[in-house]
Structures are given as structure tokens and as C-alpha cells.
């Protein structure tokens, strides 16, 4: 297993917990943290024993967005350097999207700017009741450009415009109500609920979830006809998996 400097890597019953471990900086994103996450995602994506991945933060917050040093760096960088830097974060979000296992963001405290984008890029988002989400970029004259691709797919156009262009803070309950996150749990039971929720996901067919995730995100750019054809092809592939054949045999034996 790789050695990490800015994250904690823990495994429990087939679930990998990746913890952003910069609590003194509210888990703000820097090159090293982003690099650690990329390595961990590659490692877990190639490990057949991994059933699910949970992304969470150490300390009081999930993630406060870009680190101050990162902001200072981009303010002084050339256009080519900034393109390379931005592409690195986009690559991380794409890795989450293409990862074969379900990735669950467990958000407590604040998820701000790139931190909100990181959480929303995960397949599922669960939050403590006191958690909050905010795209703060516009408040410093910046654009939530990369994370917009995720927000626009999670929300209606009007909702996306409101939270991206006004820097509106979303409470966990409002975020759940508008479909930005999946579940809200009480703070005092949050860790236990994260384990319970993830255990339920990890017990499902790994191949079925992996293929479903792949097809779901592929259809983003497809026409209706293309999506149906992709569904036909995936349907045929799924029928050939051991999980499906065992599941059908089990179902028929009960009939």
C-alpha cells in the first residue's frame, strides 16, 4: 500500500475510509492532498476486495476548498501553469466518476468551494445535520468552473445558478430537499449511521453496482436512442456476470 502524507487510509469489512487529514487547515486542498487522493483512488479501484469507499474529513470540517498557499500560487502563475493546476483537480473528479466502486462522501462541518465540489462529485453524499455546503468562489471574484460540471448534473438549471452565482449557503436539510445530497443524519449518531449506510451498499453485488455506475454516467452525453442502445449492450454484459447468474438461480429456487 502507498504511503500517504495528507490522508488517512483505513479498511474495515471491505470498505475503505479515506480521511482528508489536514484538520489544522480545515482539510483545505493542496497539491499533495489531491495527489494522495488520486493514488488512493487508483489503489482502491484495482483492489477486488474493496466494496465501497468513504471520503471524509478530519477535525471540524469536511473540506474548506483551496488552501491559502494554493490561492497565492495561482494568483502569480502563468496561464499555462494555471491550466495544468486546474486540470489536476479536474482529473481527481474524473477519477471519482470512473472509479468502479461506489464512493460515498460523509460530510460534517463545512464543505466549501472545491470542498463542496469534491463532495458532490461522489456517487452518494450523506451529511451530519449541522453540515453546510457553499460555493464561495464568486465572493472573491472567481468562478466555480470545474465543479460546475458536477453541480449542473446534480441540480436543475435554476438551482445551480442560484448556488453557483450567489454563493448561497446550503444547510444539510436544504441540500437534501433540493436533491444535492442523499441523506441527513443527526450529529451524535453520524459516524454510526455512516457505517450502517455504507455497510448496506457494500453488501450489494459489486459487479452490478460497478456496471450500473458506468452506464449511468455514460448516458450524460447520449441521446435517448443512444442511451437505450447502451442499455441493451450493458444488459447483455450483466447477464454474463457470476453475480447475476447466481442471483437468478437463487430467485428461481424460491419460486
Image (tube, rainbow, N blue to C red):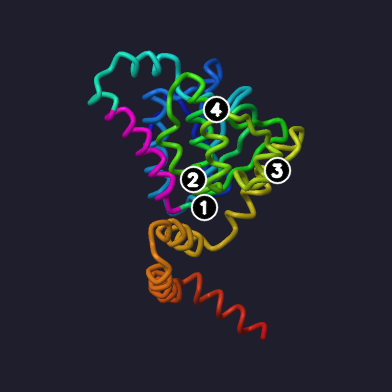
The crowd level at tag 3 (other Cα within 10 Å; few <14, some 14-19, many 20+) is some
| Mark 3–mark 1 CB contact (< 8 Å) | no
| Mark 3–mark 4 CB contact (< 8 Å) | no
The residue drawn where x is 55% and y is 79% is 248
Label 3 to label 4: alpha-carbon separation: 23 Å
Which dot marks residue 112? 4
Label 3 to label 1: alpha-carbon separation: 17 Å
Seen from the viewer's position, the closer of residues 152 and 72 is: 152
Q: Which residue position holds label 2?
A: 152
Seen from the viewer's position, the closer of residues 202 and 210 is: 210
Which label lies toward us, 3 or 2?
A: 2
The first of marks 1 and 4 along the sequence is 1
The crowd level at tag 1 (other Cα within 10 Å; few <14, some 14-19, many 20+) is many
The first of marks 3 and 4 along the sequence is 4
The residue drawn where x is 30% and y is 13% is 76
Across and down, in percent, residue 206 comes to 50, 60
Which label lies toward us, 1 or 2?
A: 2
Q: Which residues are magenta?
A: 83-100
Q: Which residue position holds label 3?
A: 193
Judging from the image, what secondary structure is the residue with disc 2 in? Answer: helix
Q: Residue 99: say if magenta.
A: yes
Seen from the viewer's position, the closer of residues 55 and 120 is: 120
Judging from the image, what secondary structure is the residue with disc 3 in? Answer: helix
Which dot marks residue 51? 1
Across and down, in percent, residue 161 comes to 53, 39
Across and down, in percent, residue 25 comes to 52, 17
The crowd level at tag 4 (other Cα within 10 Å; few <14, some 14-19, many 20+) is many
The first of marks 3 and 1 along the sequence is 1
Amino acid at each position: 500500500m502507498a504511503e500517504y502524507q495528507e490522508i488517512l487510509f483505513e479498511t474495515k469489512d471491505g470498505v475503505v475510509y479515506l480521511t482528508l487529514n489536514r484538520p489544522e487547515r480545515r482539510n483545505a486542498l493542496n497539491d499533495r492532498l489531491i495527489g494522495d487522493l488520486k493514488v488512493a483512488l487508483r489503489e482502491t479501484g484495482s483492489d477486488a476486495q474493496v466494496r465501497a469507499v468513504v471520503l471524509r474529513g478530519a477535525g471540524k470540517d469536511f473540506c474548506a476548498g483551496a488552501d491559502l498557499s494554493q490561492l497565492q500560487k495561482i494568483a502569480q502563475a502563468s496561464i499555462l501553469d494555471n491550466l495544468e493546476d486546474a486540470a489536476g483537480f479536474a482529473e481527481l473528479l474524473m477519477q471519482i466518476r470512473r472509479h468502479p466502486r461506489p464512493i460515498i462522501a460523509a460530510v460534517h462541518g463545512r464543505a466549501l468551494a472545491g470542498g463542496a465540489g469534491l463532495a458532490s462529485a461522489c456517487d452518494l453524499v450523506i451529511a451530519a445535520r449541522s453540515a453546510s455546503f457553499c460555493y464561495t468562489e464568486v465572493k472573491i471574484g472567481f468562478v466555480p468552473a470545474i465543479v460546475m460540471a458536477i453541480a449542473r448534473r446534480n441540480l436543475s438549471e435554476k438551482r445551480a445558478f442560484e448556488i453557483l452565482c450567489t454563493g448561497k449557503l446550503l444547510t444539510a436539510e436544504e441540500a437534501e430537499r433540493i436533491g444535492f445530497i442523499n441523506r441527513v443524519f443527526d450529529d451524535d449518531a453520524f459516524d454510526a449511521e455512516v457505517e450502517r449506510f455504507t455497510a448496506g451498499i457494500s453488501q450489494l453485488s459489486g459487479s452490478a453496482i460497478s456496471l450500473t455506475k458506468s452506464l449511468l454516467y455514460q448516458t450524460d452525453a447520449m441521446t435517448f436512442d443512444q442511451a437505450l442502445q447502451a442499455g441493451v449492450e450493458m444488459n447483455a454484459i450483466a447477464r454474463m456476470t457470476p453475480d447475476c447468474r447466481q442471483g437468478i438461480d437463487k430467485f428461481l429456487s424460491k419460486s
